[in-house]
Amino acid sequence: MNKFLLLISFTFVIFLIVYASGNYDVSTPSNDSTYSSSDDSSSNDLSDDELSACTYAQIEMKNKLKAPASAENAACRYNTYESLGYKKYQVTSYVDASNSFGASMRTNYQCTVTLPDKGSDSYYISCDLL
């Protein structure tokens, strides 16, 4: 009798371990074409040039802050981009950072970025606070 209880207990423990270690995500969508995930960024795709312009603008604004280590930039996909011609973009965004008193402040900015041509490292940027 003790061996039977031990066998049932052992089987139950194994069942619990197998069940708990499985990936049972009930929120996984089926192959339904109407499903839209919050991680799906197909409508927020950025070109390589827009992503580069965003990065240059974030670096420029971080260099202008009193406490650059506290900077939290908006994700590039949430910025506004306007093409101004060949490899020239206007980026509108914000950065949250601590001011000289330690309070977190949001600073809106707009940068005009001229990206470098292939084989060059020189880019031009001009930023204005909004």
Image (cartoon, grey):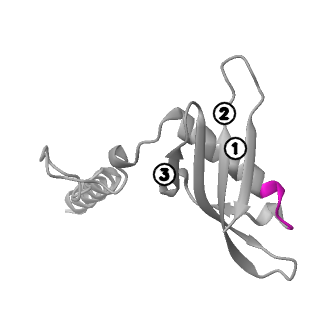
Q: Please count the marks in the image.
A: 3
Question: What residue is pinned by disc 3?
Answer: 77
For the point 80% across and 61% down, the residue is 69
Q: Say which label, 3 or 1, has the lower sequence index.
A: 1
Disc 1 crowd rating (10 Å Cα; few below 14, some 14-19, many 20+) is many
Which stretch is magenta?
62-66
**In the depicted view, which residue is nearer to us: 71 or 28?**
71
Q: Mark 1: which secondary structure? A: helix
Q: Position of residue 85 (x, y in %)?
A: 55, 35
Circle 3: residue type: Arg
For the point 86% across and 83% down, the residue is 101
Front tag of 2 and 1 = 2
For the point 69% across and 28% down, the residue is 116
Distance Cα–Cα, label 3 vs label 1 = 14 Å
Q: Mark 3: which secondary structure? A: helix
In this rendering, position of residue 7 left or right of residue 89: left
For the stretch drawn in magenta, the main secondary structure is loop
Q: Position of residue 81 (x, y in %)?
A: 51, 49
Q: Are the two marked residues, 2 and 1, in contact with CB atoms closer than 8 angstroms?
A: yes
Above or below for 29 versus 118:
below
Disc 2 crowd rating (10 Å Cα; few below 14, some 14-19, many 20+) is many
Circle 2: residue type: Leu
Q: Are the two marked residues, 3 and 1, in contact with CB atoms closer than 8 angstroms?
A: no
Q: Say which label, 2 or 1, has the lower sequence index.
A: 1
In this rendering, position of residue 5 left or right of residue 113: left
Above or below for 46 versus 101:
above
Distance Cα–Cα, label 2 vs label 1 = 9 Å
**In the depicted view, which residue is nearer to us: 28 or 75?**
75
Above or below for 107 versus 32:
below
Question: What residue is pinned by disc 1?
Answer: 56
In the rendered structure, find residue 115 and report the number of the disc placed on it: 2
Circle 1: residue type: Tyr
